[in-house]
Image (cartoon, rainbow, N blue to C red):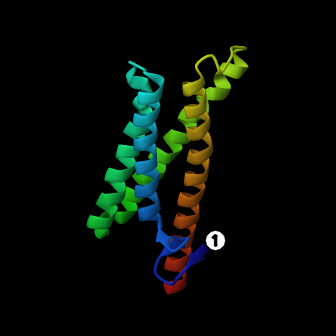
Amino acid sequence: MIEGTMQEFKIFKQSIEMISIYYGTFLVLWGVVITFISGSQSVTALIPSFFGLLLIIFAVLSIIFRNKQKLFMHLVATVGLLVFLGGADFFRTLIMGQDPFSNIFAAISKLMLFSTGFFFVFLCVQSFRFARKQKADRT
């Protein structure tokens, strides 16, 4: 359920900043758990964690520095778009005629990044549209 008040865009009674922090935390945990489960020695297994840390940092900064909220939330949305595009790499392997599941953990991570990144960017866009409408209604 997506709802709005006169002040702030909310999803399930959570602000987009808090959703960003939750999603970032999920990505950090995902990267750490997948690295541990797969026994990977490659830093690439932690890519979701790196994106997650950026999301958390920018979302927290948008809460702390309200006068720069627009900037930080645009950075959050940009990181979300990078998450989505990183997950789209799954389809590159399909197009190249390779088996995308040759490394099952990488494939699952890419599909997770693709699907959750898409949904997260969708929420960010909805939030930006809501904010723009609120601004227009005030003038």
Horizontal and vertical percent for residue 126? 58, 64
Q: Nearer the viewer, residue 16 or 81?
A: 16
| Residue 21 seen in this snapshot | yes
Residue 67 falls in which quadrant of the image? bottom left
- Amino acid type at circle 1 is Met
Q: Who's the residue at 48% across and 24% down the image?
A: 38
> Which residue is tagged 1?
1
Q: Quadrant of residue 22?
A: bottom left
- Residue 37 point in image, percent of width and height: 46, 28
Identify the residue shown where x is 51% and y is 73%: 9
Q: Residue at x 42, y 52 (%)?
A: 76
Say whether residue 42 is left or right of residue 89: left
Q: Residues within 10 Å of mark 1 (few under 14, many from 20)?
A: few
Left or right of 14 on screen, residue 41: left
Q: Residue at x 67, y 27 (%)?
A: 91
Q: Can residue 139 be seen from the camera position used here?
A: no
Q: How many marks?
A: 1
Tell which of 17 and 6 is nearer to you.
17
- Left or right: 41 as drawn, with respect to 37: left
- Residue 57 lies, in percent from the top left, at 31, 51
Q: Secondary structure at mark 1?
A: loop
Residue 119 in the image: x percent, y percent? 61, 52
